[in-house]
Image (spheres, helix red, strand yellow):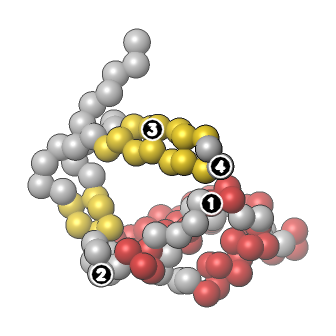
Amino acid sequence: MTQIRAFQPRVVTSEHAGSVVGPAYDSMTPDERRSFRAANPQNYINVMRSVDDFPAGERPAEEQLLQENIDQLGQLLASGAYRQCDQDSVFIYQLSVDGHSQTGIVAE
């Protein structure tokens, strides 16, 4: 049975939302993601890079990329772009596109 538990999340601060929050990762091609990353170095999408996001001759080893993504997340957190919530939370969201709605839960 699935268990849903509240957790103590970090949320984007209002002053950083414009630079940190970006488009859906899977809505862009690898080329579009590369261009977006270059233009938006403080965006969370820079934490989610995969080897497929690099041109064939420039792909880093998975371990190297994982460490770079971890480092990028550390820089983003250190910048004050996120704040720790004071209490455990569960988030419910709904996305609607072209007449289709999808509801999800963010929890531990």
Q: Is residue 98 left or right of residue 59?
A: left
The residue beneath circle 4 is 98
Badge 1 crowding class, 10 Å Cα cut-off, few under 14, some 14 to 19, many 20 or more, is some
Mark 3 = which residue?
104
From where the camera sits, is residue 62 visible?
no
Dot 1 falls on a residue whose secondary structure is: helix
| Crowd band around label 2 with a 10 angstrom C-alpha radius: few (<14), some (14–19), many (20+) | few
User: Looking at the picture, which amino acid does disc 2 mark?
Assistant: Glu
Q: Are marks 3 and 4 in contact (CB under 8 Å)?
A: no
Q: Earlier in the sequence, mark 3 or mark 4?
A: 4
Q: Which residue is mark 1?
A: 25
In the image, what residue occupies the spot 65% across and 78% down? 36
> What is the distance, in whole Å, between disc 1 and disc 2 at their CAs?
22 Å
Residue shown at 30% from the left, 81% from the top:
15
Earlier-in-chain disc, 1 versus 2: 2
Q: Which mark is residue 15?
A: 2
Amino acid type, residue under disc 1 in the picture: Tyr
Whether residue 12 is visible to the viewer of this picture, yes or no, is yes
Q: CA distance from mark 3 to mark 1?
A: 17 Å
Q: Quadrant of the C terminus?
A: top left
For marks 2 and 3, the one nearer the N-term is 2
Judged from the image, the secondary structure of the residue bearing numbered disc 4 is loop
Q: Amino acid at mark 3?
A: Gly
Circle 4 Cα neighbour tier, 10 Å, few/some/many (<14 / 14–19 / ≥20): few
